Amino acid sequence: MQSSKEKKDIIKTAEKGAIHPVSSTLISIKSILESYGFRSINGPEIESEEFNFDMLNIPDSHPARQMHDTFYVNKKSSVLRTHTSPVQIRAMLDNDPPIAFISSGKVYRKDDDATHLPMFHQIEGIYIDKDVSFAQLKKLIYDITYSIFGENIKLRFRPSFFPFTEPSAEVDILFSESNEWLEILGCGIVNPRVLDNCKIDSSIYSGFAFGLGVERIAMLKYGIKDIREFYKSNLDFLKQF
């Protein structure tokens, strides 16, 4: 048995742990959004196709529903959620407008390269009320981005398409390490069909939604070129943070 002195010596020489850079980035983003009045909610990582796709106006023919893009489980009766949007669907079904929620956590897609992972973290926000506009959404995106990176960061909005928002946009930040634009989030005005699916009268209410990739934000924040570095358990890499 170890003596009390030996135990104390081990404690003295043990290295202190630290918060993982992805976790630190997620906590920081949640704190910023909560300061704007968004309430954090959670939901299951194994989802039904109804909540992951159907309620979000994603048709059967959409590429995201194919086996090469999505992880199906339980004999294809369920999926590993591809985004945290199903959490927002549940929130809209359970709450009357006005609502302002953020949902965060692990999501899963069949991607694996320098800027994509099969498992990554996402944080999404949704705001539903009367007379919600894209101008409000754009102002919030600028505020969030400046809070994370400072006001000298360069960003751009690109028109895009998502079944659950219309109009939609993707937002890129200029990655100084490579002088290339890197997508960090998608956003848009909530599609009226999604509101109707959730029993919210789209003739009265409107809303905006956005989703940020946490690892992408961390890459930009810390100047990381390959997203896979975050999960190699390389202590020399992690000690930098």
Image: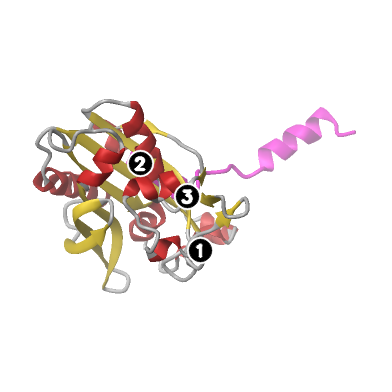
Residue hosting label 1: 229
Disc assigned to residue 28:
2
Please tell me whether mark 3 sits on a helix, a strand or a loop: loop
Q: Quadrant of residue 231?
A: bottom right
Q: Residue at x 27, y 57 (%)?
A: 162
* Gap in angstroms between the C-alphas marked 2 and 3: 23 Å
Which disc is residue 151 wearing? Answer: none
Upstream in sequence: badge 2 or badge 1: 2
Q: Which residue does the image show at 31% across and 74% down from the upper left?
A: 178
Residue 170 in sight: yes
Q: Quadrant of the N terminus?
A: top right
Q: Colour mode?
A: secondary structure
Residue 54 at x, y percent in the picture: 38, 49
**Magenta includes 23?**
yes
Question: Marks 2 and 1, how far apart in space?
Answer: 20 Å
| Farthest right residue in view | 1
- The residue to which callout 3 is attached is 81
- Mark 1 and mark 3 in contact? Answer it, CB < 8 Å: no
Front in this rendered view, residue 174 or 73: 73
Q: Which picture quadrant has residue 161?
A: bottom left
Q: Which residues are magenta?
A: 1-30
Q: Residue at x 29, y 63 (%)?
A: 183
Q: Quick one: label 2 or label 3, which is nearer the N terminus?
A: 2
Observer-nearest of 72 and 177: 72
* Left or right: residue 222 compared with residue 181: right
Q: Amino acid at mark 2?
A: Ser
